Amino acid sequence: MRLVVHDYAGHPFQIQLSRELARRGHEVLHLHFSQLRTPKGAVARRESDPATFEIEGLALDGPYEKYSLIKRRFQDRSYGRIAAERIVRYRPDVVISGNTPLDAQRELVEACRKHDIGFVFWLQDAYGLLIEKILAKKLPLIGVVAGKYYRRLEQKLIRSSDAVVCISEDIAPLVRESRVEPERIHVVENWAPLDEITPLDADNLWTREHALAGKKVVLYSGTLGLKHNPVLLLQLALRLRRRDDTAIVVVSEGLGADWLRREKTEHGLENLVLLPFQPYHRMSEVLASASVLVAILEAAVGVFSVPSKVLSYLCAGRALVLAVPPANLAAKIVARAGAGLAGASDDAEGFVSHVERLLTDERLRTRLANAARGYALEAFNIDSIADRFERIVESASRSRAQPQPTRGRWPGRREFPSSPIAKEI
């Protein structure tokens, strides 16, 4: 088949899927937004890539105003039109699109319907519901209105898709609420590339370059957005500031990282090391520097978002500590794997205590680390994952070949002001 995999964020496991589909003989175009500041996967061509595989980073004409209340929505729509135009020129049989702001996703769905292209909505985050929960809390009046709008829009996009891929069983009921037939709903849990993120010694070139060799490192790597609470990382650094052998390392960019930088200066936290996103080809070294890997997720997110960093952590073979909603799939996976300790999102004391326990208990740390890599080896087999996606795109293609119901009215484009949320949450 001729396929487009559109992953707005450019994350590692989506590009791995595209490569595997191309290796199997499909013609594949992988698209991502090159201007988004987020950890990117291996989005450059490799010598081993087949000639039928293309990768393109799409960009806007000017800088991306991610945190602008006014400009963000218009830029998301502009990006969506750029991506839709490229898809139409490629003329695929099916498009798989995930991690995409709803205003941009809308442009893709409309273009695919217009040009009779199958569309698979890869539901990584239930944006509509998250916007309704988080934005309404931060901006009570405009947040409620915008939240309801985006939730209706998301439901419309889901209904208009030929197939929907949910990343957990917990999200499937939300899709069914959008009046989608059961045969169009598929559950495929996220994963991380086993062959790209591998366990290494803590004493490696990256740790020596950053003066971390010989230290016990507590590492957070990834986005710090509206669904993450950086206060937990600050409290961890404050609690451990008198441990000369320990460093709290945060590899991130954006608002959360900027806030931590100000707090580091205010509190004089020499043990808090803040670094920008690192090159993907060095990610194994980065994660290997850690004695403990940590992840955080706000309670409002509930079951509707799964931090992909946790899956990379498992591949790295290190002990984990999570502060996430107990019902979240990340907490379930870590418990299932026996790979770490988890507590509630708002339990700062429990979060810090879990980290302290692992720093002082090497035997427990080693047992959890071994279990983490063992789980990844069992669960992240790209062959079986690609098998499932092949069946999904085939079903989407068959669905597109059948007569389609008349499309209903879309929510008005100018009903509500711009939202800063889309991808940030």
Image (spheres, helix red, strand yellow):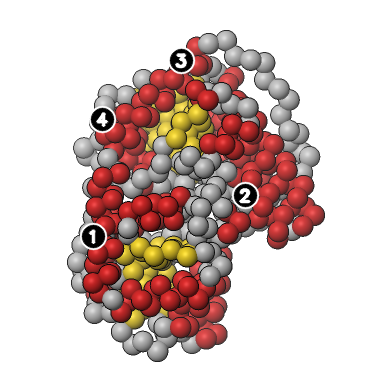
Q: Give the alpha-carbon distance from disc 2 to disc 4, as whole Å.
A: 36 Å
Tell me if I can see residue 282 in this picture.
no
Residue 252 falls left or right of residue 48? right
* Circle nearer the N terminus (3, 4): 4
Q: Position of residue 290 (x, y in %)?
A: 30, 69
Q: Find disc 3 in the rendering and name its residue.
A: 398
Closer-to-camera residue (216/42):
216
Q: Give the alpha-carbon distance from disc 1 to disc 2, as whole Å.
A: 34 Å
Indicate the quadrant where residue 404 lies.
Answer: top right
Q: Which of the two discs, 1 and 3, sits closer to the camera?
A: 1
Q: Is residue 12 depicted above or below 223 in this figure?
A: above
Q: Find disc 4 in the rendering and name its residue.
A: 23
Q: Which of the two discs, 3 and 4, sits closer to the camera?
A: 3
Residue at horizontal 59%, vertical 38%? 174
Residue 370: which disc? 1
Q: Give the alpha-carbon distance from disc 1 to disc 3, as whole Å.
A: 43 Å
Task: Check disc 2 and report its element: helix, strand or loop.
Answer: helix
Q: Amino acid at mark 3?
A: Arg
Which quarter shows the N terminus?
Answer: top left
Q: Find disc 2 in the rendering and name its residue.
A: 130
Around disc 1, counting alpha carbons within 10 Å, would you say few (fewer than 14), some (14 to 19), or many (20 or more)? some
